[in-house]
Amino acid sequence: MQSIVEVQQLTKKFPVGTGFFTALKEIDLSFTRGEFAGLVGPSGSGKTTLLNIIGSLDIPSSGEVVVMGNSVSRLTARQAALLRKQQLGFIFQNYNLLPVYTVYENVEFPLLLLNLSASERKSRVLETLEWVGLTDKINSRPAELSGGECQRVAIARAMVKRPVLVLADEPTANLDSVNSHNILKTMLRLNEELKTSFIFATHDEKVIAYLRRIIRLEDGRVVADEQVTPTNT
Amino acid sequence: MLKFLFNGLLRDKSRSLLPVIIVTVGVMITVFLHAYLTGVLTDSIEVSAKLTTGHVKVTTYGYEQNSSQQPNEFAMDDVEQLVEELNRDYPDIEWAERILFGGLLDAPDSTGATRAQGNVSGAGVRLIGSDAEIERMDLQTKLFSGRFPEQPGEILMSNDLFVRMKLAPGDVVTLISSSMYGDMAMYNFTVCGTLHFGVAALDKGMIIADIADIRRALYMEGAAGEVLGFFPEYYDDELGLQLQTEFNSARLDKEDAYSLVLTPMSKAEGIDFLISYSNYAGLVVILIFVFAMSIVLWNAGLLGGLRRYGEFGLRLAIGETKHEAYASLVGEAVLIGLIGSVIGTAFGLLLSYLMQHYGLDASSMIKDSTLMMPTVFRARITPETYFIGFIPGVLSTVIGAMLAGIGIYKRQTAHLFKELEA
Ligand SMILES: Nc1ncnc2c1ncn2[C@@H]1O[C@H](COP(=O)(O)OP(=O)(O)OP(=O)(O)O)[C@@H](O)[C@H]1O
Ligand SMILES: [Mg+2]
């Protein structure tokens, strides 16, 4: 299997007052193409921190993180932006849609950065909105959507550029049970059809039930890493 | 991409409408203040030019060196010839001869003994045969009682002195002064009218008579202390300085106190400051407004402040660099600044135009000033008025956005997400 993320001896320290707080301690992990994996652990265990470093939004204090052949600590700001632009998709707990833009425009935005032609953009946006079942909401503004619909727009926005890897931080935290299951099913389907890899950060049992790999974090350490058979398929 | 950003700007009223309104108001005030200051300063300069300095002034070198003493011993002879030459060499400029002098005014009683006396400063200007000087010095509005001289021997005096000396219209007064040669000179005048200037220095003791009478009184036939030159319109310092160089290199000989010298009004004592004020007025207004508006726009957080960290965090996650995000923030600011400046300049020009056309009559407010000031305040629209507002308009939005956007740089990318998640 082709490896897309290699984490070796990763340690992350944050300056706190006069000293440091160590959020991640000597982490070794490897992700391959097509995974549907989750970082699971209590609040403060370091899930978001690890996800940010894999997403090249933050850098390691020591150790090495290689994402699709790029060493995160050695990327320039421009190279890191390019990596995110071309290969990575992000999904957040509170969707982070741009309120003044329509569903269509929110999903189109990443393609504008990629300088695709207008017709190419249009067909991709429409296709992606179809995947997440939002073709009837194309011209709505985020404020007119339900939470579940907003998160589906966010998924479409992450998926529209067909990234290799999607990083999802607590994507269901603001959703009810029905919507959570819908979202997860959508993502699972995209994972299977497009071979897009997903890495979640979560402590939501509903999410955990869908995962095929569970990495347990505690106090910044990996305490378990196991392949599982999804209980919910 | 541009269209995308532009749409966002248009739809988010707090990012477009409010800043545009603030810029519009600021620019409008800037433009108006600039036109107003330019107008009032220009008018003040013109009042001084018309009453005392001319736009340029030709005198002898000796006269110029001691000009505060009105040294008529250094007066110019054969002025008629000089004015002819000046008219020939500078046909666009109007030339006017004047004689300034000091003296004592004496009012005799029926027996010829002194009834009342007063110190006076006097001016001999052309009053009979031409209205040019009356109009130039705006004497019509200064006439308090009586009329202008119509025949030789008639004189105008300031009303305050007239009252102080308990004179009546038609009374005869004797001017006691010194002749061009330094001897005592006495001459009788009939008071035909009184003037009120509203300027303490002039109202204390001023007399004005026709220059021909003054020549007779001071034994100055064919002579004049000064010849004032007036440009067709406002004073233009570039032209003034150019004439100075031109004229003086041809005429001035510093060894010869009777050689002629031309002095532009910007070099005249007491006026120079006005002219430098008027040059810096615009600059000061601009600086104040750039500063004030930047602070307002920045603090109002209207240009991508805290409220938008989330948006920028997202844009960074999607793959923009901080540079690109910052540049688009500044680009938005330029756009807003330009739009606000265009609207503000239009409104400012309208206000300035009204103020230029109608003016504000302040004669009741400035009853007794120490400065020679215009009594009607008017704005003046110059070519500068059209673009001056753009400087604070665009600078303030850009500075405001740059200050607000520093947060994007200062925060680590991951921190922007913290704010995004909050
Ligand atoms: N910028 C920072 N400065 C200092 N400490 C930080 C910073 N970011 C995270 N931490 C600390 O690192 C630890 C891990 O934080 P992280 O956000 O990764 O936890 P998490 O597992 O995502 O928790 P949650 O489930 O609540 O989201 C926490 O104790 C947090 O306080
Ligand atoms: Mg977290």
Image (spheres, coloured by chain):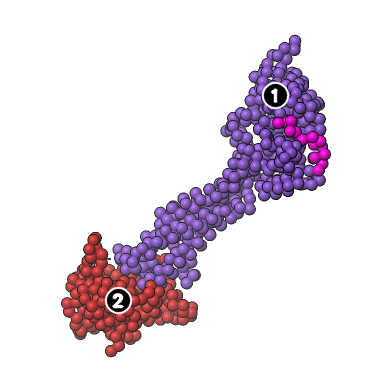
Chain colours: A red, B purple
The magenta-colored residue range is B71-85
Q: Chain of mark 1?
A: B
Q: Position of residue B198 (x, y in %)?
A: 62, 30
Residue at coordinates 22% horizontally, 72% vertically from top-left? A24
Q: Is residue A68 left or right of residue A230?
A: right
Q: Quadrant of residue B171?
A: top right
- Farthest residue in the left direction? A223
Residue B103 — which label? 1
Q: Amino acid at mark 1?
A: Gly
Q: Quadrant of residue B377?
A: top right
Residue at coordinates 69% horizontally, 46% vertically from top-left? B240
The residue labelled by disc 2 is A54
Q: Amino acid at mark 2?
A: Ile
The C terminus of chain B - image quarter: bottom left
Q: Is residue B43 left or right of residue A144?
A: right
Magenta span has B74?
yes
Q: Position of residue B287 (x, y in %)?
A: 51, 51
Task: Report the number of discs.
Answer: 2
- Farthest residue in the front direction? B255
